[in-house]
Image: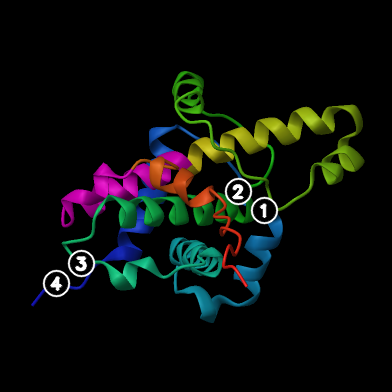
Amino acid sequence: MSAVLPLEEWMIASFWEMLRKLRVTYRFWPDVLQQIEERPDDFGDTPQERIENYILDALFDYHEDDWWERINPAQGEAFWEGAKNEFFLAALQTLEEVIAEPILAMDEEAFRAIQQSFSFRANLQTPVGEYLDAYGEEGAARYEDYAERLHVMAKVWTDLLFARLEERYPRARQATLFGPYYRRGQFRVISSKDKEEK
């Protein structure tokens, strides 16, 4: 009988570890803190519990595939790659919902190294036009800086979580973020024309 996977604890532990590893100086969005303050019974007994439960709620809201319910030791690279991609995208959206713009500080050397280590970029939920409306000429640069830092944070958060998963499922660490299985999944399969003679 296998032990229960402490996935939620690992997700949160990896979140805080990511912030420490990248030495991020950040603020939470005021509306997030307001929601937590207005509904304390929904999120926990202490300020830290409340923000952690808010983060978990957001993560699970953004997940499109409950891959963790299908984990077993025999899962191969394709499964873990899909799981890693899924968590990365949910982490990116969660960070945008929770961490306020601008991100005040980060270990710049680590940021640049990780930024250059992967090429995939997803659109943020907030359109760049809203930054242009709010900040004028500075809007595009602010949007790009915020987006790049969120991508790096999501990448590190994902890598740290999957390093923890590897403790129990060794193949989890083999998965490459947006690697060959992801790219194969993007190919459009066109069915051949019906050549049956009448």
Name of the residue lying farthest toward the bottom: 41
- Kindly identify the residue that appears in the image at 21 percent across and 50 percent down: 171
User: Marks 3 and 1, how far apart in space?
Assistant: 37 Å
Quadrant of the rendered structure where residue 40 is?
Answer: bottom right
The answer to whether one can see residue 103 in this image is no
Helix, strand or loop at mark 2: loop
- Residue type of the residue flagged with mark 2: Ile
Residue reaching furthest left? Answer: 1
Mark 4 to mark 3 CA distance (whole Å): 12 Å
Q: Tell me the crowding category of disc 2: few under 14, some 14 to 19, or many 20 or more residues within 10 angstroms, Cα based.
A: some
Q: How is the image coloured?
A: rainbow
Q: Amino acid at mark 3?
A: Asn
- Which of the two discs, 2 and 3, sits closer to the camera? 3
Q: Main secondary structure of the magenta part?
A: helix
Could you say where residue 192 lies in the image, as x and y percent from the top left? 56, 58
Residues under numbered marks 4 and 1 in contact, where contact means CB atoms less than 8 Å apart: no
Q: Pointers 4 and 3 in contact (CB under 8 A)?
A: no
Q: Which residue is mark 1?
A: 29
Give the residue pinned by disc 2.
Answer: 99
Per the image, label 1 sits on a secondary structure element best described as: loop
Secondary structure found at label 3: loop
State the CA–CA distance, disc 2 to disc 1: 6 Å
Q: Could you tell which of marks 3 and 1 lies nearer the N-terminus?
A: 1
Label pair 3/1, CB-CB below 8 angstroms: no
Mark 4 vs 1, N-terminal side: 4
Tag 4 residue: 3
Query: Start and end of the magenta stretch?
Result: 155-175
User: In the image, which is nearer the foreground, mark 4 or mark 1?
Assistant: 4
Type of amino acid at the residue the image marks with label 4 = Ala
Q: Position of residue 14 (x, y in %)?
A: 36, 49
